[in-house]
Image: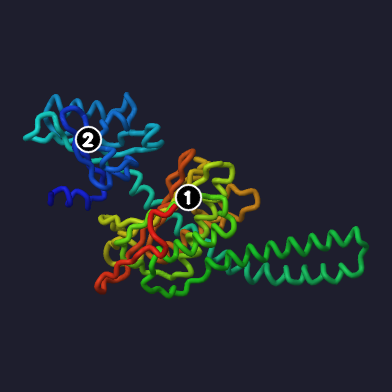
């Protein structure tokens, strides 16, 4: 029993197959990997989750025949149940005292690659800093003059021309608003942080959403009540999740059964080298916003956190870049997994420094529909 609890702390998915290829055990990470509970996995065979031609099945057969461990790198496990682009390293080891049984460890290569991309996204967001400072001085001042001149002309022109002066004012206001948003990137002041109950943050965002842009969306809350506090700025975290939830609602506009899930979990084992830190930083807190909308186009997935990248007709492309900056300023990372009918934005962040760990309770109940 103690050994099984140890396996549950591993970040890598681990399953035990019996001689009939039935999943006899799966750790907690395997539940997440296969999107199934342990009770469901215990009734399934490994063939139920992978394509019939999957190289994983050949590896299982090879280990069973030769009774020796096998490591295979960059194995494609893509399938309708696991989704596309599931590239993993696979380690298969026979169980000596149970003939035909074996342990399979999956290591997602994309995890490290996504984190590397996150550091690139963070640098791209901060590269806007100099541009934002320049725009604030070199563009906003002339724009105010243009707007003032348009207001003066408005009183002296015909009704037909007044529409044109109104257009000048509206467009200058739009550009000023864009510059104002960019100036946020040039703010390098240290953020004020304190222990924050992330469930209070998510409940506030949920309340705002169902009162406005998300009133027709079904929300599901899956909160881990044992989660420790996150060290952060409450207002900025609200801004992060409000942006993600608003994007999720827009992605679900044409879905009659639109649903957004807000999930929290404790994921021990993730440690990253963060710029400015002398040692690797633990990021055990996982917060997810999941929707069943149309997904993110494949051609922009690699660049979606870069400034000015957007699929919205009138979007500025700064929303997700700002989210990446705020998460980075908190010492965390954000990643996105998107398929045709499922998109998950996942944020990993450090916990507040341990005083006796104060466990937090969901503000309005977990697993709420």
Q: Residue 347: x, y in percent?
A: 40, 56
Residues at circles 1 and 2 in contact by the CB criterion of under 8 Å: no
Instruction: Please tell me whether residue 155 is drawn above or below residue 163 in the rendered image.
Output: below
Of residues 179 and 205, the one nearer the viewer is 205
Give me the C-alpha separation between circle 1 and circle 2: 30 Å
Mark 2 residue crowding within 10 angstroms, few (<14) / some (14–19) / many (20+): many
Q: Residue 271: x, y in percent?
A: 28, 58
Q: Residue 328: x, y in percent?
A: 42, 62
Q: Secondary structure at mark 2?
A: strand
Instruction: Answer left or right for 64 relative to 133.
Output: left
**For residue 167, which quarter of the picture?**
bottom right
Q: Which residue is mark 1?
A: 260
Mark 1 residue crowding within 10 angstroms, few (<14) / some (14–19) / many (20+): many
* Residue depicted at x 26% and y 31%: 45
Dot 1 or dot 2: first in sequence order is 2
Instruction: Answer left or right for 11 relative to 176.
Output: left
Q: Say whether residue 118 is visible.
A: no
Q: Which residue is mark 2?
A: 23
* Residue depicted at x 48% and y 61%: 240
Q: Residue 81: x, y in percent?
A: 37, 34
How many numbered dots are placed on residues in this image? 2
Instruction: Please tell me whether residue 363 is drawn above or below residue 368 in the rendered image.
Output: below
Of residues 134 and 254, the one nearer the viewer is 254
Q: Secondary structure at mark 1?
A: strand
**For residue 225, which quarter of the picture?**
bottom left
Q: Say whether residue 197 is visible.
A: yes
């Amino acid at each position: 029993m103690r050994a099984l609890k140890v396996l549950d702390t591993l970040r890598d998915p681990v399953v035990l197959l019996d001689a009939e290829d039935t999943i006899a055990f799966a750790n907690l990470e395997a539940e997440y990997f296969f999107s199934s509970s342990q009770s469901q996995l215990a009734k399934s065979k490994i063939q139920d989750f992978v394509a019939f031609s999957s190289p994983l099945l050949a590896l299982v057969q090879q280990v069973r025949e030769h009774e020796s461990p096998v490591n295979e790198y960059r194995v494609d496990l893509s399938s309708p149940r696991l989704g596309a682009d599931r590239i993993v390293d696979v380690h298969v080891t026979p169980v000596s005292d149970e003939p035909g049984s074996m342990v399979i460890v999956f290591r997602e290569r994309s995890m490290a690659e996504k984190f590397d991309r996150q550091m690139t996204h963070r640098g791209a967001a901060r590269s806007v800093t100099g541009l934002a400072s320049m725009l604030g001085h070199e563009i906003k001042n002339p724009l105010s003059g243009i707007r003032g001149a348009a207001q003066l002309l408005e009183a002296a022109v015909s009704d037909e021309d007044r529409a044109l002066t109104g257009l000048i004012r509206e467009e200058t206001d739009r550009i000023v608003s864009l510059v104002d948003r960019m100036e946020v990137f040039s703010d390098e002041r240290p953020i004020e942080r304190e222990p924050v109950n992330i469930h209070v943050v998510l409940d506030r965002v949920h309340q705002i959403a169902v009162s406005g842009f998300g009133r027709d969306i079904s929300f599901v809350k899956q909160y881990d009540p044992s989660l420790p506090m996150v060290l952060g700025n409450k207002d900025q975290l609200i801004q992060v999740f409000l942006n993600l939830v608003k994007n999720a609602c827009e992605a679900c506009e044409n879905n009659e059964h639109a649903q957004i899930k807000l999930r929290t979990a404790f994921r021990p084992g993730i440690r990253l080298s963060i710029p400015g830190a002398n040692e690797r930083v633990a990021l055990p807190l996982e917060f997810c916003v999941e929707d069943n909308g149309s997904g993110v186009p494949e051609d922009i997935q690699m660049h979606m956190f870069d400034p000015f990248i957007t699929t919205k007709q009138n979007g500025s492309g700064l929303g997700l870049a700002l989210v990446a900056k705020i998460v980075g300023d908190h010492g965390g990372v954000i990643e996105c997994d998107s398929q045709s009918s499922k998109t998950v934005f996942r944020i990993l962040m450090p916990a507040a420094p341990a005083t006796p760990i104060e466990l937090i309770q969901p503000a309005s109940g977990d697993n709420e529909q």
